[in-house]
Image (tube, grey):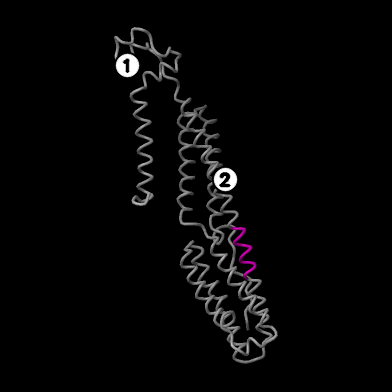
Amino acid sequence: MTELSPAVRLILAILIFVSITVTIVAFAHTRIIALANGAPWPPAADAEEHPPHDPALYGPYESPPPSDLAGRIIGMTATAFVFLLAFTLSNFWSNAEDARSAFQEEVSNHGTAVSAARLLPPGETRDRSLAVLDEYARSVKDVQWSLMQQADTQAALRAHREAALAVGREIVLNPDKELRSQESFPVLQQAAESMIAQGTERINQLPRPEAPGVVMLIFLLGVVNLAVASAFQPARLRTNMFLMGTYAAIVALLIFVVVETSNAFLGAGAILPDGFIHPS
């Protein structure tokens, strides 16, 4: 686990399962067909006169139609498709709601901080407080938002940390004596702290690095299910075309919904960087 990359582990898992399964089918296919046709097991007494794989031992049995096996494959892939899709969509939707809530709280606290800073007496302290709050909002809208749309969590966190440090130095961690003495300072400090915390929470709701792989797996399961159903579940041409087209449209719609909800800051229902109050 520690010495092999995830890609190598995946390839090994596929090779092991496929090789074992195909080997069993290849060497025991005759017996499997016989058992499927109701042949006795163990075979008759003259089994010793024939090799274990000799068709003469079992007789001219016919293989079941491939639609039987295809039905099992369709059932398995459909179950995996629906389970992964529901699980992934639930996570994406939950992350989007948490991100929306965090951003709304962040904007609200930013507005409270700006309002508290405006109550400070005119002077350098007031101007610096308003300036760092303005720079924080600009960082969110002009720098962090594009990084979040690209799901670049680390870069977005770095940009947020730089903006938060500027606010922290001026208001939260090391406010000057004049600022601490003002009546509105406790409200300003608390609002700034909450704003920074909610900004971090906003970025933490971005999709994880493994999210594209999960979406691709859902896509492949849907394609496999459609391909097997098309090949082994035939019907009259027009009926087949209509039903398979409907089936494909439903699969495409479900995958589209998953992709659209994967990033709360991008897509049809994206959160927009609106609502910040300009300090001036």
- Please provide percent x and percent y for residue 195: 61, 72
- Judge the density around disc 2: few (<14), some (14-19), many (≥20) Cα neighbours within 10 Å: some
**Could you tell me which residue is drawn at 52 percent across and 31 percent down?**
240
Quadrant (top left, top right, bottom left, bottom right) of the C terminus: bottom right
Magenta residue check for 101? yes
- Please provide percent x and percent y for residue 221: 47, 41
Amino acid type, residue under disc 1 in the picture: Pro
Q: Nearer the viewer, mark 1 or mark 2?
A: 1
Which residues fall within the magenta stretch? 96-106
- Label 2: which residue? 86
Amino acid type, residue under disc 2 in the picture: Ala
Q: Is residue 48 above or below residue 141?
A: above
Which disc number belongs to residue 13?
none
- Judge the density around disc 1: few (<14), some (14-19), many (≥20) Cα neighbours within 10 Å: some
Q: Is residue 126 above or below residue 17?
A: below
Taking depth in this image into account, of 103 and 244 the one nearest to the observer is: 103
**Could you tell me which residue is drawn at 59 percent across and 91 percent down?**
124
Left or right position of 155 against 264:
left
Q: Residue furthest front?
A: 2
Q: Quadrant of residue 172?
A: bottom right
- Label 1: which residue? 52
- Please provide percent x and percent y for residue 113: 65, 78
Q: Quadrant of residue 12?
A: top left
Pick whichever of labels 1 and 2 is earlier in the sequence.
1
Q: Is residue 268 above or below residue 223?
A: below
Q: Main secondary structure of the magenta part?
A: helix
- Please provide percent x and percent y for residue 245: 53, 38
Left or right position of 123 against 18:
right
Magenta residue check for 53? no
Secondary structure category for the residue under label 1: loop
